[in-house]
Image (spheres, grey):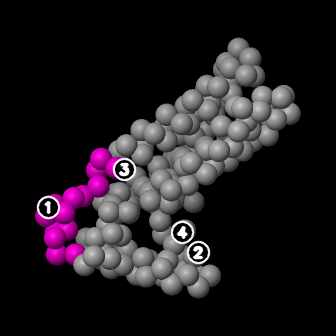
Amino acid sequence: MGAATLFGSLLALVVIVGSLFGFSFPLSVVVFVGAVYVAWLVLLVIDVSTRPDETTSGVQRLTRDESRVMNSYHLTLAAPGAGELLSCFLNALRFAGILWGAFCIGKGLYWIAALAMAYWFVSAGVIVRFNPRPYLAASAKNGNPTANDELAILTRLENELGR
């Protein structure tokens, strides 16, 4: 387990434990669900607002496919450790959302359970964009030609950037 993965898991643990200090179970769940959606939204805004545009130095010389991969996975290309950390953080919160959702169903809190479990799907795109290599490698291993092409382009861009 890398340092970024460990730190991302610890950050998620802070959110999970912090949400337990509500005065009641429903309040704790609301705090948790609110915190994970706010974290996801903040990271999504950061992801979208830091994407390189066509006028950025170096982007102009890229092929169309390279430019698409650069825009999709720019954070992992710019700061691979940060991308892995944020991906792990959001991913750990996904698992916690499933657990909280199951507990909520047991308590009859169906709407909050739905929100907690929906986070699994809502956060998936950002998680993959922050740390695409494991997901692309798994898809490429299963014979997905698009994943194989994106993985090759990602590796080529990382080599060009000296990562």
- State the image quarter where residue 30 is shown: top right
Q: Earlier in the sequence, mark 1 or mark 4?
A: 1
Camera-nearest residue between 144 and 3 = 144
- Furthest-front residue in this view: 111
Residue identified by numbered label 4: 134
**Secondary structure found at label 4:** helix
| x, y percent for residue 158 | 32, 72
Marks 3 and 4, Cα distance to the nearest angstrom?
Answer: 19 Å
Can the viewer see residue 5 in this picture? Answer: no
Please state which amino acid type lies under the numbered disc 1: Thr
- The image position of residue 93, as x and y in percent, is 61, 43
Q: Amino acid at mark 4?
A: Pro
Q: Earlier in the sequence, mark 2 or mark 3?
A: 3
Element assignment for label 2? helix
Q: Evaluate if marks 3 and 4 touch, with contact meaning CB atoms under 8 Å apart.
A: no
CA–CA distance between discs 1 and 4?
Answer: 30 Å
Q: Nearer the viewer, mark 3 or mark 4?
A: 3
Amino acid tagged 3? Asp
SS class, disc 1? loop
Q: Which residue is mark 2?
A: 138
Which residue is labeled 3 in the image?
47
Report if the CB atoms under discs 1 and 2 are less than 8 Å apart.
no
**N-terminal label among 3 and 4:** 3
- Residue furthest top as drawn: 23
State whether residue 20 is above or below residue 136: above
C-beta proximity under 8 Å, tags 3 and 1: no
Q: Nearer the viewer, residue 2 or 22?
A: 22
Would you name the residue on which mark 1 appears? 55
Which residue lies at the image location 65% right of the left edge and 44% below the top edge? 118
